[in-house]
Amino acid sequence: MLAIIPARGGSKRIYKKNVKDFLGKPIIAYSIEVAIQSGLFDEVMVSTDDHEIAKIAVQYGAKVPFLRSNKNADDHATTFDVIVEVLNVYKKTLDKTFEIGCCIYPTAPLMQVQHLKQGLYKLIENKLTTVFPIVAFSYPVWRGVEMDEYGKVKMVWPENKNSRSQDLKTIYHDAGQWYWFKTERIGSGLFNSNSGSVLLLEHEVQDIDTIIDWKIAEIKYKTLFS
């Protein structure tokens, strides 16, 4: 099994996000270490176009057998594009193939080995194509509002105006930590009609796009692992 950690050099919202210090070490180190500690992978590799990221990745135990192409290092490349490139290079250049892969994001310090193992178990036992972690929205999206250019608001689903929150269906979103996948069956994307999930709790998940997100992730990490 192959773990792919996609970590390009360009980051707009947080400077050098993938190698920024997170409670004493580069944030990407957490993803690498959990992948290695899980004992699930034959190889843990980092896909990057950046020499600094590559050096740090190797320092923490990952492999960087090749640098990412310029085509898949810009703002328009998707995670799926990177996965396809990695699998193709391994097969055509390195003569290696893998039946199962896992894409692990480089800024997922709250990721846990037990959840990775749950995901792999579901992938195999339920004969799924992909499996990824999800978390419930903290507020019912059904009572969401939208705002016009003048600041006036209206409900997106006005039929729920007088509904109690507990009576509305729970909606979940991608936790943004990892994706297990069968390499021969992922088709054109990581989410399809045969995708499964592992449910996480809100304190086990944090999307990191801003410095405030970063600080919240640090608080959650200390709560989880201290």
Image (spheres, rainbow, N blue to C red):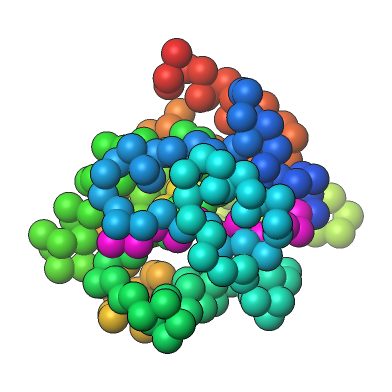
Q: Nearer the viewer, residue 39 or 143?
A: 39
The reply to whether residue 159 is in sight is: no
Q: Position of residue 156 (x, y in %)?
A: 59, 58
170 to the left or right of 222? left
Residue displayed at 54% across by 48% down: 58
**Is 63 or 161 nearer to us in this picture?**
63
Q: Which residues are magenta?
A: 1-11
Q: Residue at point 39% right, 70% down?
A: 191
State whether residue 142 is above or below residue 203: below
Q: Residue furthest right?
A: 150
Residue at image point 63% right, 23% down: 24
Q: Is residue 135 left or right of residue 194?
A: right
Kindly give the residue lying farthest to the bottom in the view shown.
Answer: 92
Residue 219 % position (x, y): 57, 21
State the image coordinates of residue 110 (x, y, percent, origin top left). Answer: 47, 34
User: Which image quadrant is residue 48 in?
Assistant: bottom right
Query: Which picture quadrant has residue 211?
Result: top right
In the displayed image of the protein, which residue is found farthest to the left? 125
Quadrant (top left/top right/bottom left/bottom right) for the C terminus: top left
- Residue at 69%, 70% (x, y): give it: 73
For residue 114: magenta? no
